[in-house]
Image (tube, rainbow, N blue to C red):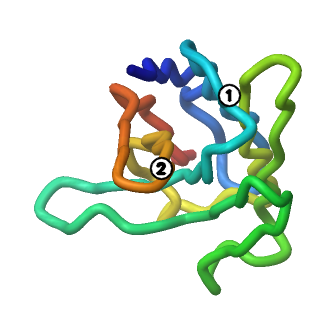
Amino acid sequence: QVQLVESGGGLVQPGGSLRLSCAASGSYFSRYNMAWYRQVPGKQRELVALVYSSGTTTYRDSVKGRFTISRDNAKSTIFLQMNSLKVEDTAVYYCKATYVDYMYWGQGTQVTVSS
């Protein structure tokens, strides 16, 4: 069993930055592929960024060049550095861990980009 706890969300002006963290409990964190998703009311949850156990990363097109996902296996934590934030980045951001048939979600953290 893995528990994921996100933090770092908040209110920021357009063009600002935030850094999200997702701390994982449990064993074998380094084996998990870790991802950030986001969801706005009435829409499907969408993948924002993914970091594989190998360290390889992928991003959705709309955040490329602005967001950076990273992981610290020693601390069982992943991060999402978000720069040049836009109003359309407003959402609840969720952390997800996957390994083979196992999948875990965090409770989410709200990010609001508004002037």
Residue 49 is tagged as: none
Residue under label 1? 21
Residue 68 sits above or below residue 61 on the image: above
Q: How many marks?
A: 2
Residue reaching furthest bottom?
61
Q: In the picture provided, is 57 more to the left or to the right than 1? A: right
Residue at point 67%, 33% (across, down): 20
* Label 1 crowd (10 A; few <14 / some 14-19 / many >=20): many
Residue at point 45%, 22% (across, down): 2
User: Depth check: 53 or 96 in front?
Assistant: 53
Which quarter of the picture shows residue 78?
Answer: top right
Mark 2–mark 1 distance (CA, rounded to whole Å): 17 Å
Residue 62 sits above or below residue 21 on the image: below
Residue 29 sits above or below residue 16 on the image: above
The quadrant of the rendering that contains the N terminus is top left
Q: Are marks 2 and 1 in contact (CB under 8 Å)?
A: no
Coordinates of residue 85 in the picture (x, y in percent) = 69, 57
Residue 22 sits above or below residue 33 on the image: above
Q: Earlier in the sequence, mark 2 or mark 1?
A: 1
Badge 2 marks a residue whose secondary structure is strand
Q: Amino acid at mark 1?
A: Ser
* Label 2 crowd (10 A; few <14 / some 14-19 / many >=20): some
Badge 1 marks a residue whose secondary structure is strand
Residue at point 67%, 54% (across, down): 14
Coordinates of residue 112 in the picture (x, y in percent) = 48, 41
User: Depth check: 55 or 36 in front?
Assistant: 55
Q: Amino acid at mark 2?
A: Thr
Which of discs 2 and 1 lies nearer the camera? The answer is 2
Coordinates of residue 109 in the picture (x, y in percent) = 44, 29
Coordinates of residue 96 in the picture (x, y in percent) = 46, 44
Residue under label 2? 98
Residue at point 50%, 49% (across, down): 99
